[in-house]
Image (tube, coloured by chain):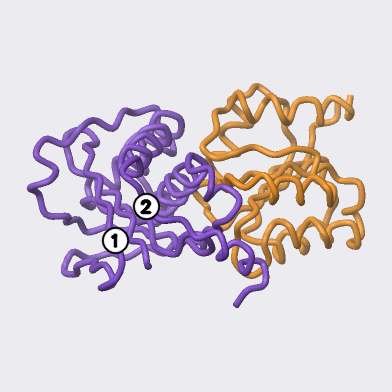
Chain colours: A purple, B orange
Amino acid sequence: MNPALDSKVQNSVRPDSSWPSLIQVGAKEVFQIMLQSELTDLPDAESQTVTGEVSAMVGLAGALCGVMSIRCGEHTAEKMAGRMLGSVGKVDPNDVPDAIAEICNMVAGNFKSKVTQLAENCLLSVPTVVRGEDYEMLAVSDGEQITVGLAYEGAPVWFCLAVHS
Amino acid sequence: MKRPRILIVDDSSVMRKIVERSLRQAGLELGDIVEAGNGIEALAAVKAGAFDLILSDINMPAMDGLEFLRQLGTVEGGKGTPVVMITTEGSESRVVEALSIGAKGYIRKPFTPDQIKERVTPLLEVLR
């Protein structure tokens, strides 16, 4: 194991009932500051299936082991990237995955900073991006998954935290 | 005033563009702006020509921002260059570590152009 993580693992943290709202607040702050846009509530989020062609993931290690991910449709991802870059007209396609990865990274970091026990005891990986719709994220059998659905300009954007036990 | 030559180090090309845009929005008079995708590329850029200011991410592949900071002083043209770290890390200890090995300040992502201006302006004032 990475020696830098040894002491952090000792202070293992489990999810609690406040985490969904902390993820939601963290995501909204990132969109307000970096995109100058509002994420709004997604009606009937609980009954919807998490789908979308663009996903970004950031690993968490230490007191919390898991993955924070963001997932949305291609068109929504393009709009988010364009807004983030202040682009007028069509955004460079190469910038789309990079922008979504960076949003995921900031949401994970912002969430982490809101959980006192995690701020000092959890490290983030560099982000990974997956494109394509035909896959499903499954929580490990003994883990937990928190899913928060929000809307960006009316389209769903999903934030998921999969926690390993 | 000399127009400052600035190096932006981040593995995200989008974030490099946003940092550059934020510097321009801050109304600062800027010289060359050079980009690097990790610490190794950043050290090579410094060897090729000194900078007046470096803005660097911490969490990067190949060589992270803290290792880059450690090695910067050993590279010709690197010693004494002010470095501001840009990080998503909520960890005070990583920020303290960066400051202890020579960073002049840090900016937490997400950030506003005003926050960039606030950190960068005093470091560029000395060039006047």
Give yes or no for contact between labels 2 and 1 (Cβ–Cβ under 8 Å). Answer: yes
User: Residue drawn at (91%, 52%), measured in percent from left and top?
Assistant: B79
Q: Check if mark 2 and mark 1 are on a common chain.
A: yes
- Counting residues from the start of the chain, the first of labels 2 and 1 encountered is 2
- Against A154, residue A98 (above or below) is below
Q: Quadrant of the N terminus of chain B?
A: top right
**Few, some or many residues within 10 Å of mark 1 (<14, 14–19, 20+):** some
Q: Amino acid at mark 1?
A: Glu
Q: Is residue B11 left or right of residue B119?
A: left
Question: Residue A108: x and y, percent?
Answer: 44, 49
**Residue A72 point in image, percent of width and height:** 24, 51
Q: Secondary structure at mark 2?
A: loop
What's the residue at 27%, 58% (across, down)? A145
Q: Is residue B13 left or right of residue A22?
A: right
Residue occupying image coordinates x 54% and y 28%:
B112
Circle on res. A144: 1
Residue at the (35%, 44%) spot, across then down: A19
**Relative to the observer, which residue lies in front, B45 or B81?**
B81
Q: How many marks?
A: 2
Q: Which numbered tag is attached to residue A15?
A: 2
Amino acid type of the residue tagged 2 in the rendering: Pro
Compared to residue B65, the image places residue B86 above or below, namely above
Between residues A31 and A80, which one lies in front from this camera angle? A31
User: Which of the chains bears the disc numbered 2?
Assistant: A
Quadrant housing residue A55 = bottom left
- The picture places residue A120, in percent across and down from the top left corner, at 61, 50
Q: Secondary structure at mark 1?
A: strand
Chain under numbered label 1: A
Instruction: Residue B46 in the image: state x and y as whole percent.
Output: 81, 56
The tag on residue B31 is none
